[in-house]
Amino acid sequence: MSLDEKATKPHDRLAQALTEDMAAVNALIRDRMASEHAPRIPEITQHLVEAGGKRLRPMLTLAAARLCGYAGPYHVHLAATVEFIHTATLLHDDVVDESQQRRGRPTANLLWDNKSSVLVGDYLFARSFQLMTETDNMRVLSILSNASAVIAEGEVLQLTAAQDLRTDEKIYLKVIRGKTAALFSAATEVGGVIAGAHENAVRALFDYGDALGIAFQMVDDLLDYGSASDVIGKNVGDDFRERKLTLPVIKAVAKADAEERAFWSRVIEKGDQREGDLEHALELMRKHGTLEATRLEALAWANKAKASLHALPAHELRDMLSDLAEYVVARLN
Amino acid sequence: MSLDEKATKPHDRLAQALTEDMAAVNALIRDRMASEHAPRIPEITQHLVEAGGKRLRPMLTLAAARLCGYAGPYHVHLAATVEFIHTATLLHDDVVDESQQRRGRPTANLLWDNKSSVLVGDYLFARSFQLMTETDNMRVLSILSNASAVIAEGEVLQLTAAQDLRTDEKIYLKVIRGKTAALFSAATEVGGVIAGAHENAVRALFDYGDALGIAFQMVDDLLDYGSASDVIGKNVGDDFRERKLTLPVIKAVAKADAEERAFWSRVIEKGDQREGDLEHALELMRKHGTLEATRLEALAWANKAKASLHALPAHELRDMLSDLAEYVVARLN
């Protein structure tokens, strides 16, 4: 790796290597989020799309297909499909979480209303299914429809697990597999499938996406407790205020003495949160080393992701995916 | 038609003729609405499903497939798919409309919360796509994913057209094609497609579903102004209170003098509704004969639905579909 390559983030290098493909994906997304009859739809989708997410998921699909030697056109459809599913879930998440900010901008539910967010999310889901049917490949349809069901199931599970101190690490893993890793692993898997890759390679791509998604979400949950200061568009303590049981809290609850348990019960179960409670929660997490323990777990998943890549052919994109897995956790430092 | 046949509603006769198929559909629905990880999901879906909708849409699919001579198993999957899409849209509609009652029972958003309704709706959408992929038939996938997009688009259009007196009959037709007719026509069309019916028959089935859905929704919109007293689970005036521009109102606005226009502007555009306004609205609709004009339009669509059936083979199910189209409007009397 040259000094120059080291200087750029792996995500940016992926974007550079996939410039043409990503341009095609963006053009397809713009084309399909239009609506002849209901101008409210492009208004809202543009608001979200132009806020400029990192487009990480579609890049995973493109990279997976390309490194398996795909030369057809449908990886672009699949990448756009994955981004549509992601955008639809963001719209619905913001309604469910009553969020005010997304990617540093006011959310659609705030700028328009919850109704529009629900219905435009539905529209994007439907559009994603239209897009994937165009690939004429039943296996990718099956993978992506399964992933959609797992995502929704994970979100419902998260809803019922919130505010419940009995939520353990096993339930947490199910929740984040659903809400995040399912789409990551579907994104990489369909890239391999559309390329007609060997079953071993398809499996490796699934494993990579799954482990990367888990590491990514664990780090996201850490960042919610402010482990890095340069992250834009994130409000520290959101999960705490929403009484979500994420890994650092679950680990702290498991190690709590009677007094600490009473604290967690008051702020998470009863939702009685007062001035200084977030700071006290952070103190308890530091005392029991749960932020660091969470970081180490994320690191283990990132390493698992990297190891999965060995089953894939040598390729510059494979190396970038490896660097990406490393970076996902390294961005904490 | 024997006296006995005349005595039963066409819907009940369809249910009787399709008893075995419907039992298979109900079993499949029960099986697929389960969730290993998130018990909230079957709680909510059971609440809806056990409230016992008429299962009209899945019966349309079954009838279409059977009358085209289908002998395979997949019409059952498609019928369940159609019911899942319908149930998902009901869950999201009730959130969007802030409804309190559905099928004479409290809505899920009231019993649980909006969050659960949004996410469980998403789960049912995803499940519906899983179900349809099992048929391994790309054309039905394409029809049903297109229908889902048209449904969502129609709902968004309805949202933006509400409270806007410029909404005309053309926009109204687009809205109800989206919110109702699109799923009716997809339900009948996929029945023909899965049966491998001739293109003329497939087209006839689409036309039947489209016209039936339009007639059905026009009658529904009439019933919202209380044209029949024996309809259970409907609150008279809901559309008026939600400031929806349905056909009887659109026609009344078109014929309004200056004073009447000021009234419509106040209650629909400004949302300033007072005691006696619903009664006054009804008076204006009666004065301009718009309730009767709407009924006549619904009747014309029902007749169009019946006429479409001529292209299909003679079959007792075809006759029941014809009677059904007639009954949809006759239930107003």
Image: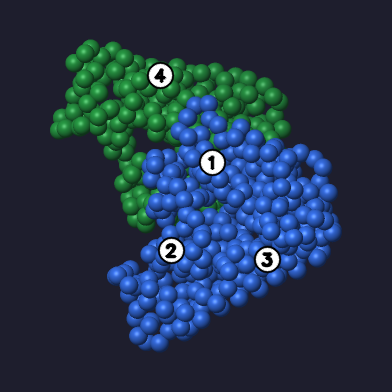
Chain colours: A green, B blue
The vertical placement of B276 against B56, above or below, is below
* Mark 3 nearby-residue class (10 Å; few <14, some 14–19, many ≥20): many
Measured in 3D between alpha carbons, the distance from the residue under mark 4 to the one under mark 1, in whole angstroms, is 35 Å
Residue drawn at x 58%, y 73% as measured from the top left:
B295
Measured in 3D between alpha carbons, the distance from the residue under mark 2 to the one under mark 4, in whole angstroms, is 50 Å
Q: Chain of mark 3?
A: B
Residue of label 3: B326
Q: Nearer the viewer, residue B264 or A26?
A: B264
The N terminus of chain B sits in image quarter:
bottom right
The C terminus of chain B sits in image quarter:
bottom right
**Where's residue B193, x and y in %?**
77, 51
Q: Are marks 2 and 1 on the same chain?
A: yes
Q: Nearer the viewer, residue A94 or B306?
A: B306
Measured in 3D between alpha carbons, the distance from the residue under mark 2 to the one under mark 3, in whole angstroms, is 24 Å
Check residue A169 in the rendering and tell me which mark sits there, or answer none.
Answer: 4
* Residue A140 horizontal side relative to residue B238, left or right: right
The vertical placement of B115 against A261, above or below, is below
The vertical placement of A243 against A78, above or below, is above
Check residue B50 in the rendering and tell me which mark sits there, or answer none.
Answer: 1
CB under 8 Å between callouts 4 and 1?
A: no
Three-letter code for the amino acid on which mark 2 is drawn: Val
Residue drawn at x 67%, y 33% as measured from the top left:
A193
Find residue A61 and report its image quarter: top right
Three-letter code for the amino acid on which mark 4 is drawn: Glu
Residue of label 2: B236
